[in-house]
Every structure is written in structure tokens, then in C-alpha cells.
Amino acid sequence: MTLAALLLAASAPSALGDPAQEARAQSLEREIRCVQCENEPIAQSTADIADDMRALVRERIAAGDSDEDIRGFFRQRYGDFVLFRPPFDARTWALWAAPLLLGGAGLVAVLAGRRRRTAAAVGFTPEDGER
Amino acid sequence: MIAEIGAFAAALALALSFAQGGLGLLFAQSEARAAAAAAVSQAAALSCLLAFGLLMTLFVQSDFTVAVVAANSHIDKPLIYKIAGTWGNHEGSMLLWCFVSASFGAIFATLRGKQSLGLWSRTIGVQGLVTAGALIYTLFLSNPFARLDPAPMLGSGLNPLLQDPALAAHPPLLYLGYVGMSVPFSLALAALLEGKADQAWARALRPWTLLAWTCLTLGIGLGSYWAYYELGWGGWWFWDPVENASFMPWLVAAALVHSAIVTERRGSLASWTILLAIMGFGLALLGTFLVRSGVLTSVHAFAVDPQRGIAVLVLLAVALGAGFGLYAWRAPKLAQPSGFAAISRESMLVWNNFGLAVAAGVVLIGTLYPLVVEAFGGGLISVGPPFFNATVAPLLAVLLLLLPLGPMLTWRVGDMRAALLKLAPAAILALITLVVALVMTQWRAAPALGLMLGVWLIAGGLIYLWVRLQRGTGKLLAKIAILPLAVWSMSLAHIGAGVMTLGAVAETAFRTERAVALAPGEGVAFAGRRVSLVQVGGIEGPNYSATRANFRVDQASGESRTMSAERRYFTTSPMPTTEVGILSGFDGDLYVALGEEVRGGNGAWTVRLYHNPLVQFIFIGVLMMGFGGVLSLVALARKRNAST
């Protein structure tokens, strides 16, 4: 292994020098969609356009953009579809509220059922437990 | 000629299934006619077996005058993949669906046990109609026996990504799971028609629910493992719509496995168990729809056909309409449940069902939401991993946090204080894990909490086993030998959930990846090792040619290992596939995928390196859960034999 070979390997395809920046890039690449593929993040895709999009992410990070800037940049270019994280707006508030609404409805159902069932179990003492 | 006999056998099966439905449902008061329905169900299953066997024969013979064979097989394909080709396509997989549904009906009819006449007969009847619906769809909208003229000489081949042992077994397992949910559905409708869902009913329900859940567990696990080693990016779950399509019935089946225990043991929750059985089958049908219609942008979109999708939706509407209609009409008349205290085994199982059902609902909404937005003119949006990881994952985490408490509580009324005291060692171990993980990850809360959860589940499961072994007198070894299988199976499945949690958390939070350009002779330091490219050469497979790269890995210990990765080019497909190299060790997998030759790079190749800590725990955990399901089935079968 020569030193030159080591250097070449170290300056590998578009890795960012700062590990924190590299981590940010990899995490962003997992939530940006390859616009040409079937439901794949650019982190995963082997398509040429995904290569270009990955390079773009790294370019923006190196230029000092924040994660939110970069998401906004891609959204402006390709629309909401490009982000696997749906935005929170007039169309999607119901989506983001769904877990709370479903959980709330389930909670009400469980508690209502519990009142009915435990009413029949008022007289239970620990000795009534069955193994 | 074989194809025509096959089509005839399928048509015969359709007629028999209708007869089975009519006899079973209309004459449920007569032993003789119910016995006739049972005999007809066996004939229907045999007809389906004949049809499916003949289709398989056509694939083995590479009879390219049959359209499905020509489109999905190739003369050069290895025999095992010719056979797997039978279900590796839309038409054949639908025939498999029918075959499984008819077989389950026949098996149910044959193993009557102590079931009452009305329940037995009506279940056979509903199951017959389910099979008939699937057969209508298969024969009229996706006939696997349609001829092709002129016939091609070679066949166009199976999607090369699917030429893989794990994926040969993945669809049949998933279908056993999907269709397995049809028997609980039939039992639920029969119970509603009967107006009675008692403990005997739940006893009949449990093995089928367990079977479906076990097959779904193993099928999803296999698909996930395949994605991990075949797609070449080190991922095992992406909340893809088609993954969600199998995960939703899995969640409901898991809820049903637990609620059916309550109904069998205590007679409670019968109405909820019925509702779950209906929803579970509905989600299994929806799963078929999502995969087969291609309405959702998905990596699995090799089965795109909107017309078929609409037909599956009609079947779904009929099944759910009948199910929910009957439920609304008859469920209020079911016997009132017996009570249980707020702190009891039943109560914990209610919370288990709450968590699993809400999770299934959230996955359903997240999966369908982009369609709704698009339909209302809101444009295209994506709902992907960031949404599900932020919603479903925390919900399941809370569920898993409560899990070890359940088995510790007695039925009817339990003692939470005593349960917590017994679990104290597990809690202490989990808290130590939390603190250590927080310090080592420099205060990253999410992975630390996840690891804590995994340790809590495993330790809690072991403590439950220990507590059970304290009961009675005698030597420990003797007590181990007589510990009921049901205890082993439950503990294995619950500990498996913990093992899987550890793997999933470690892989998600601590994975590292790196893309490098390497020429032969060069190496790179990665994840405490040194990975060097030794050489790149061409090799020939049975129906593909490949570029293979050999790597040498120098471990920190000084030990040296070799591994290789390939890119395969199939004559039948423009896209190359990847065969990754995986080196498993104690700290996880080193995973190498070969990219393309770098343009003007002096013989250098792009290589993607991944280190996936504890990733094998995910698959081991899934296997443990699946094996727990199998053991539980054996336990039920033994109990059944002992009681007859």
C-alpha cells in the first residue's frame, strides 16, 4: 500500500472532511427521494440523478447551509414529493394529527370499556387472581 | 393440453367453492349437509391443488405457449427458480392464494374437534365464499392459463432481483399469512351468524390466528433479510407502502393472537376479537390490493394493473361490508363479558391491543395519505420513514415497555406491586444500560432509550421463566422438563422482540457508511478494520455474467479475512443487480457493495462500505418470534389431542 494510494482512497467519492458534516449529509440523503426511482432515497439509489443530488447535498452543506435550508432548496426544485418527511401544512395537518386522534379515540374506548368491566369486578380481592 | 386441464380444474374449484358456501351457510342445522359441505371443501382444495400443480408443471417444462410462463420464465433458469416462478408473478400468485384459501377451508373442515355444528358448518360456508371470490378474480381477471400465440423461443425471464432463495420462499410464506387471516374472518362471521362467540369459539380461532401471525412474521422477516443483502444499501426496513401492506395485517394478527387468549381463557373481549378478525382480513386484502394495483409509488411496482386493483377493491368492499354490517347488526346481541380488575392480565392485554391497533391505524393512514392528498388536488407528497419513525416507533416503544408486566399479573385481578418487585432486577439492568448508553453516545437519548428497552424485554422475559420455574417442588431440571410449552413459546417470542429491538436500535443509530473509489491493491480504513480491494474479474453464471471484486479485510486483531461482492448482468434485464459481501462478527456486519468502474479512474471502482452494528439481532429476533409462534401452535395441538 503506497502513500499515494492511501491518499486517493481517503479523498474518496465526495466524502466531506468533517465527520459531523458527513453524518448530516448521510442523514439528509436518507430522507430525500430519488426523483427518477421507485420509492428510493438518494442514499440508496444507483441512478445518475441520485449521484447528482447527493453531490448537491454535500455542496450545500460545504457552503454552510442548514438542514432546513437544504430541504427547502430541494422542495423548491422538485416539489414536496422529494422529501420523505411530509411538511406540516393545510393538507397534512390531519396526517400529523392522526396518531393523536387515533390514540385518543382508542384511549376513550379502552377507558369506557374498563369502567363497564371493572364494575363487575368490584368485589375482587387479590385471592381471586388466577394463574 | 395441460393448460386447458388446469383452467378446467380452477373452474371446477370455483363451482365447488360456491357449493361449499351454499351448503355450509344455508343448511347449518343439518349434520348430513354440513358433512357434505366439508367433503365439497376437500374436493375444492384438491381441484385447486391440481390447477396449481399443473401450472407448476408448465413452468418446469418451460411451456412458452402459456403467456405467464413466457413472461416470467426462461429456458436457462435453474430448476428451483423455474418452480419458484410459479408464484413469482401476479397470475400464479393469485392461483396460490386460491389454493391456500381452499386448503385452509378443507383443513378446517377436516379437523372439526369439538366445534358445534352451526359454527363449523357456517365457517366452512364463509370460507368457501372467500375462495370463490378469489377464484373469480383469478379466472376472469388474471387467468394464469391464458395461451400466447406466437410463442417465444426463450421466455423473458423472472425479474433478476427475485432470483434468490429467500425471495423464492418469501411470497408463499406471506400468502400463508395473508390467506391465513381468512379463517379467523370466516370464524368471526360464523360467530356473528350464530349469535354466539364463546370460549369454544376462541379455542377454534387461536391456532389459525397463530398460524397466520407466524407465517407473516417469518415472511416479512425473510423479505427484510432479502432487502438487506440483495438491494445493496444495507437497509432492512424502509416503510415502503408494500412493506406497510404486510406490516398492517401483522400488527392486527399480533393483537388478535393476544385477544383470542383472553376470550378463550375468560370469555371476555369476544366482540373486540371478532372486530379484529374482520379488520385483519380486510387489511390482508388491502395488502393484496396495494401490491397488485400499483397505485402507490413503490419499489415493488412490478405488478402494476389498475383494473385488477379495482376488482380487488370490490372484493374488499364485499368482505368488509358483509363483515362490518353483520357486526353492527349482531355484535350487540353477544353475551356480556365477565369482568376483570383494572390491574390484571386481561387489562394488560387490552393495552397490548390498544397499542397494536392504533399502530396499525397510523400505518394505514400514513400509507394511504398521499393518495388522499393527490385525489383532492393537493399535489404529490411523500410519507416516508421520518413520519413513521416519529409516530409508530414511540407508540410501539411504550407498548414494549409495558410488555414484561403482562405475564407477571394474574388473571381477573393482579398485584402490580408484586409484579414490579419481581421485575426489579430487569429494571435495574435496563437503567444501567440506559446510563452507560447515554454516556457512551454522548447523551443521545433515543438510541439509549431503545437499548434500555431491549435489555428490559430480554431480562423481563428471563425473569418470567425463572418465576415459573419457582412454582411447585422438586429439582430445577425436572421442573424445566415439565414447564408447559405455552410458557416457553410466549417467553421465546417476547425475548425475541427484545433481541430484535436491540438490533433495530443499534443498526439505525450506530451504522456507519462510506463510499470510496478503490483500484486493485488499494485499501481504506473503515470501522476499525482495513478493507483492501484485491482484484476485479469477470465470471459467468447460469443465466447472467458478473463482475466480481475480491476484498481482503484486516481486522484490528491482526486476523485477515476475505470477502467478495458482485454486480450481475442478466441478459433479460437492463439493470444490473448487486450481490453484496457480508462479513458477520461480534460487533455486527461489515457489508460491501460493488459500484461501477470510475470513469478515468485508472481501474478504480466505487465501493460502498457499511458497518451495521448488531444487525443480525434483527433477524435472530424475528426468527425467535416466529419459532415462538410455531411452539405455541404445537402446544395448542397437544392440548387439543389431550382433550379429545
Image: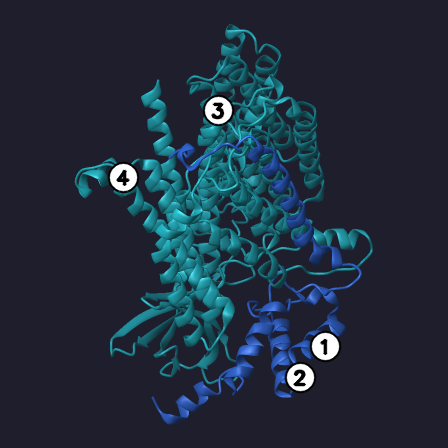
- Looking at marks 4 and 3 on the same chain, the residue that comes earlier in the sequence is marked by 3
Tell me the number on the disc at residue B471: 4
Tell me the number on the disc at residue A73: 1
Which residue reaches farthest left? B475
Give neighbour class at mark 2: few <14, some 14-19, many 20+ (Cα, 10 Å): some
Chain shaded blue? A
Chain name for mark 1: A
Instruction: Give the residue at mark 2.
Output: A65
Q: Pick the quarter of the image with the C terminus of chain B.
A: top left
Instruction: Give the residue at mark 3.
Output: B199
Foreground tag (2 vs 3): 3
| Circle 1/circle 3 CB separation < 8 Å | no
Residue B427 in the image: state x and y as whole percent. 39, 58
Inter-mark Cα distance, 4 to 3: 27 Å
Foreground tag (2 vs 4): 4
Q: Compared with residue B3, is residue B161 higher up or lower down, i.e. above or below?
A: below
Residue type highlighted by circle 1: Phe
Q: Secondary structure at mark 4?
A: loop
Residue type highlighted by circle 3: Gln
- Labels 1, 2: one chain: yes
Residue occupying the point 42% across, 37% down: A126
Residue occupying the point 61% across, 23% down: B334
Foreground tag (1 vs 4): 4
